[in-house]
Image (spheres, grey):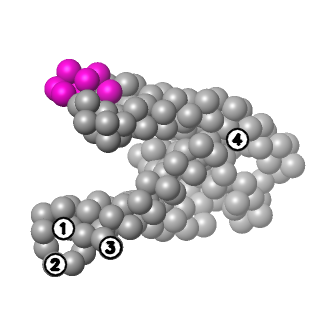
Amino acid sequence: MRRVMLGGVVAVTLAALAAIAWAQHGHGSAGVEGHQVAQACATEFEKVVSDGRGFGLAFAADQNGYPGPMHVLELRDRLKLTADQAAKVQELMHAMFAESRPKGARLLEAEAKLRRLFADRTADEATVRAAVAEVERARSEVRLVHLLTHLKTRDLLTGGRSRRRRDRVWRCRDP
């Protein structure tokens, strides 16, 4: 189920990027439609990141059996979480949001700064390189928050058991 949800986010993102590229290269009348898809995707990215969620930044963890706290809480009944586990996962989620929201805000501001360079026609190689570096630093900080929370969530669910044992326990619980 997690893979399907995340796969959907990745598929929508890739579809939006494909539509943009197609439209930008003069194919058909997709220019307006491609721009609308791109704008919808950008708007969704801004909303999700400002909420403290990761917009697929922890996909490497998700697809390999390291669940995030939101997914675990959504599946708490199927996973048969104890009340203590659910409370600890909830704490992890709140801690993740407390850390990821301000870092997400920095990422969104860095992205806006990059867009302004082009909108204001002040972009040159040096300013673009600096702005992209700032975006990627901010993105990596947000991504780390989410990936490290996935590690903590899995450890919480498995009680810090050995890797082989942890894998077996999560797979047994994974719907």
Estimate the spatial distance between the alpha carbons at disc 4 and disc 1, rounded to whole Å.
38 Å
**From which residue to which does the magenta span run?**
124-131
Q: Which mark is residue 28?
A: 2
Q: In the picture, residue 91 is in which quadrant? A: top right
Q: Amino acid at mark 2?
A: Gly
Quadrant that contains the N terminus: bottom right
Q: Which residue is mark 1?
A: 22
Which of the two discs, 2 and 1, labels the residue nearer the N terminus? 1
Residue in the foreground of this view, choosing between 61 and 102 = 102
Q: Which residue is mark 3?
A: 33
Q: In the picture, residue 17 is in which quadrant? A: bottom left
Mark 1 surroundings: few (<14), some (14-19) or many (≥20) residues within 10 A:
some
Q: Amino acid at mark 3?
A: Glu
In this image, 72 relative to 121: left or right?
A: right
Q: Amino acid at mark 4?
A: Met
Mark 4 surroundings: few (<14), some (14-19) or many (≥20) residues within 10 A:
many
- Report the mark closest to the observer, 3 or 4: 3
Circles 4, 2 touching at the beta carbon (< 8 Å) = no
Q: Secondary structure at mark 3?
A: helix
Q: Residue at x 69, y 32 (%)?
A: 98
Circles 1, 3 touching at the beta carbon (< 8 Å) = no
Q: Which mark is residue 93?
A: 4
Whole-percent x, y for residue 67 in the image: 57, 49
Which of the two discs, 3 and 2, labels the residue nearer the N terminus? 2
